[in-house]
Image (cartoon, rainbow, N blue to C red):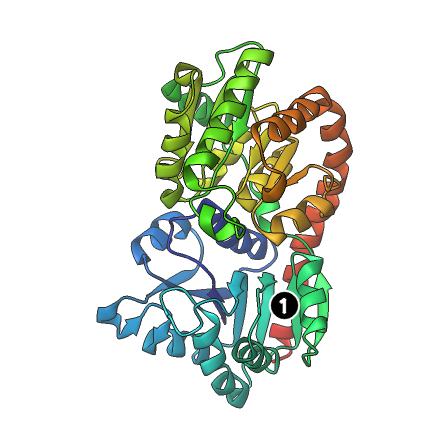
Amino acid sequence: MKTITVLGNNSGRNAGDNAILGNLLDDFALKRSDIHFKIPTLNTRFIQDAFGKHNIKPIGMLPWNLALKNLGWPMYKAMTDTQLVLVTDNILFDRKFYNPFVNNLNAISMFAPFCKKKGIPIILYNASVGPIDREVGKNALQKVLDCSPLVITRDPNTKELIEKLGLRHPEIKVHADCALNTTIPSEQRMEEIIAKEGLFTNPIGTIGLNVNAYIDDFNEQGTINREKFCKIIAATADNLIETLGVDIMFTVSQIMDMKITRECVACSQHQHRIKIVGNCDYTYEELTGLLSRVEIHAGLRTHTLIFCASAGTPMVNISAYPKSAGFLKTVGMGDWTITFDKLSTESLTELMMKSWENREELSAQMNPIVVGEKKKSRDSVDDVCRILDNL
């Protein structure tokens, strides 16, 4: 039996993070049955309940496990008592570098030399890197890359950043986010959810929206505060309801975003035409199934955009992360982005109206590209297994 440790944001609170882990395990299971996965987590029960069909071992990172989240004995043990380490998602950045409750790069770089000494390779898998803005972050990332025989990133921005920083690095392959391979649940299960939530009763259709709690972090210029942002989103929803006659479905993919989502809805003049669904109640597969039923979707959270692409739903990116814009480019939707400095009720309404009018054409253009991206993601398994089998 081979052993792989998977590092990521695996607390269960974020549907996108859950989708990365779930699809990673599913992709490996399609090709291998001899791998045992160790998964450091703040929520061992969630990991066991959600992914227990796989050969996994959740590793607790709470204070009684002798850990301050990722800094402590559990992370050290997980990285050094294994045959290979996969670093997933966007956890290698230098923001709040010395805060173990926010930053993963510090701890991973601290334990990386022990991996190197023991001959345990660290592979960036389905990963994004950055921001890396300080020398301490650059040095820490170099320690990780010194242990890595391969980098598999989900966006070209990561490759460009590593090269721009002038770091020593192995081969870098630009593949795709494995969340693209999310499987929608059965029709029966989807109909149960739709009936329970009272969704998709409007024959004209439903438009999806998604917002994010990190408004102040995204809006560096301070021109859009939280209240103004909520009013822009609500007014846009009202415009779409009044002009097109559609209903609106807000999708919450991170539990912490529920509060600001409700604030947006509270600003609407047509609250009775708006529904909220979230990962506090539904799995990432079920949310993807619901997003497959909307006509178009606009969101801040990257993985709501990825779920839409997986399901063939055209999307608009309200640009909060470079990785979101990068993802849209990879699936042929690069022009459908609006940045915060251009965000207004008028500009967002106009872009969404244009997306609505072209939704069938956009879906037809995007779907063949997504098929290729899904294959790229699954090909990552073969790259990892070649390294694992040669250890």
* 121 displayed left or right of 377: left
- Which amino acid type is shown beneath numbered disc 1? Cys
Residue holding disc 1: 385
Q: Position of residue 223 (x, y in %)?
A: 52, 44
Relative to 140, is 19 above or below? above
Q: For residue 163, say whether it is visible.
A: yes
Q: Residue at x 54, y 30 (%)?
A: 291
Image location of residue 158, percent across then percent down: 66, 63
The quadrant holding residue 272 is top left
Q: x, y percentage for residue 377?
A: 66, 53
From the viewer's perspective, is residue 51 above or below residue 203?
Answer: below
Up-down: is 128 above or below 221?
below
Tell me the element at label 1: helix
Q: Which residue is at a point 58% across and 30% down the rendered structure image?
A: 297
93 and 179: which is toward the camera: 93
The residue furthest bottom is 117
